[in-house]
Amino acid sequence: MKQQDKREREKQLVSEMIQLYCRKKHGALEGLCADCAALEAYARARSDKCPFMETKTFCSNCKVHCYNAEMREKIREVMRFAGPRMLFVHPVMAVRHVIESTREKRRKAESQ
């Protein structure tokens, strides 16, 4: 069940970041614009199919990048914008993400 919890937390975090980005950049008051909705659906599908979820915390810590080039650039833009702002919008989610990412990076460094 832990793997499923991790997957759901990652999907929720990405969705929240895309919503924040869309609200601030595209002025969407409710829901997402068509581009952001497509990005969210794509990100959720990639997460659902990830074979490495058991051994990683977030896509940013993965050596295999399964996003196509266009979507990878879009998600990077969203992350760059929304990442720092998440601390003010969803502080618990943001802090948990930083802690889990740091642990994962430390664990990988120790195993090499």
Image: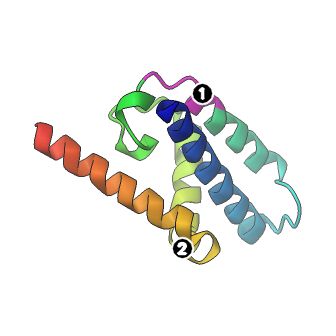
Q: Are marks 2 and 1 in contact (CB under 8 Å)?
A: no
Relative image position of residue 23 (x, y in whole percent): 77, 67
Which badge, 2 or 1, is on the more N-terminal residue? 1
In magenta stretch: residue 49? yes
The span from disc 2 to disc 1 (Cα, nearest Å) is: 26 Å
Amino acid type, residue under disc 2 in the picture: Leu
Residue 90 versus residue 29: which sits nearer the camera? 90
Residue at x-position 58% and y-position 65%: 82
Quadrant that contains the C terminus: top left
Quick check: 52 above or below 56? above
Amino acid type, residue under disc 1 in the picture: Asp
From the viewer's perspective, tell me whether residue 72 is left or right of residue 61.
right
Q: How many numbered marks have been drawn onto this rendered protein structure?
A: 2
Residue 72 versus residue 103: which sits nearer the camera? 103
For disc 2, the marked residue is 87
Looking at this view, name the residue that lies furthest to the right: 30
Residue at x-position 32% and y-position 34%: 63
From the viewer's perspective, tell me whether residue 30 is left or right of residue 15.
right
Residue at x-position 63% and y-position 58%: 17
Question: Of the numbered discs in the image, which one, if any, rests on residue 74?
Answer: none
How many other residues sit within 10 Å of disc 2, few (<14), some (14-19) or many (≥20)? few
Q: How is the image coloured?
A: rainbow
In magenta stretch: residue 21? no
Question: Of the numbered discs in the image, which one, if any, rests on residue 48?
Answer: 1
Find residue 48 and report its image quarter.
Answer: top right
Quick check: 71 above or below 64? below
The magenta-colored residue range is 45-51
How many other residues sit within 10 Å of disc 1, few (<14), some (14-19) or many (≥20)? some
